[in-house]
Image (cartoon, rainbow, N blue to C red):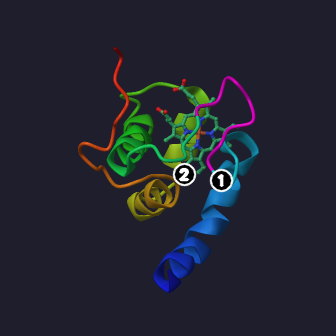
Amino acid sequence: MILLLAFEVSAEPLAARCQSCHGLDGIARNANTPHLKDQHIAYLRQQLLDYRTRKRRHALMSAIAASLTEQQIDKLAKFYGQPHSQGAHTNSLK
Ligand code: HEC
């Protein structure tokens, strides 16, 4: 818990740059903006890297991702995301 808090303190100034659209808690207030909360860390990281190289195209997110270092991208992905846990989904589409 102490570790988690320490981590959040270090990622929060970075996350302030995302807050207006994605919310500081990762819940977007606007229907056109995806939630980041609880998304897989690896997925979030990959999207930011893809925006940076423009493999995934979105003018605004590409500009934002281009302004981040890979280290900052890692921090933000961990701040918003959850580690992948297999078998965590108990709902089915029956
Ligand atoms: C001005 C609004 C705005 C800001 C600020 C912003 N984003 Fe985004 N973000 C968006 C929108 C809109 C999308 C959806 C873009 C698309 O269609 O690809 C998005 C998409 C994303 C995605 C992909 C999510 C998914 O489900 O595929 C990630 C990850 C992301 N943003 C992270 C960040 C991070 C980290 C920051 C801060 C450093 C940030 N964003 C700042 C508007 C914003």
Looking at the image, is 63 positioned above or below residue 76? above
Residue under numbered circle 1: 25
Residue at 63% from the left image edge and 67% from the top image edge:
12
Which of pointers 2 and 1 indicates the residue nearer the eye? Answer: 1
**Residue 53: mark in rendering:** none
In this view of the protein, which residue sits in the foreground, 2 or 79? 2
Name the residue at the front extreme. Answer: 94
**Frontmost residue, 14 versus 57:** 14
**Quadrant hosting ligand 1:** top right
Q: Is residue 28 magenta?
A: yes
x then y, percent, for residue 84: 30, 49
Q: Are the residues flagged by discs 2 and 1 in contact, CB closer than 8 Å?
A: no
The correct choice, above or below, for 92 with respect to 2 in the image is above
Indicate the secondary structure of the residue bearing disc 1.
loop
The amino acid pointed to by label 2 is Ser
Q: Quadrant of the C terminus?
A: top left
Residue wearing tag 2: 67
Q: Which residues are magenta?
A: 26-34
x and y, in percent, of residue 44 in the image: 42, 44
Q: Main secondary structure of the magenta part?
A: loop
Farthest residue to the left: give it: 86
Question: What secondary structure is marked by label 2?
Answer: loop
**In this rendering, position of residue 93 left or right of residue 76:** left
Instruction: Find residue 86 and report its image quarter.
Output: top left
Q: Residue at x 67, y 23 (%)?
A: 32
Q: Is residue 9 magenta?
A: no
Q: What amino acid is found at the position of numbered circle 1 in the picture?
A: Asp
Residue for point 37% across, 36% down: 50
- Mark 2: is the Cβ under 8 angstroms from ligand 1? yes
Label 2 or label 1, whichever comes before in sequence order:
1
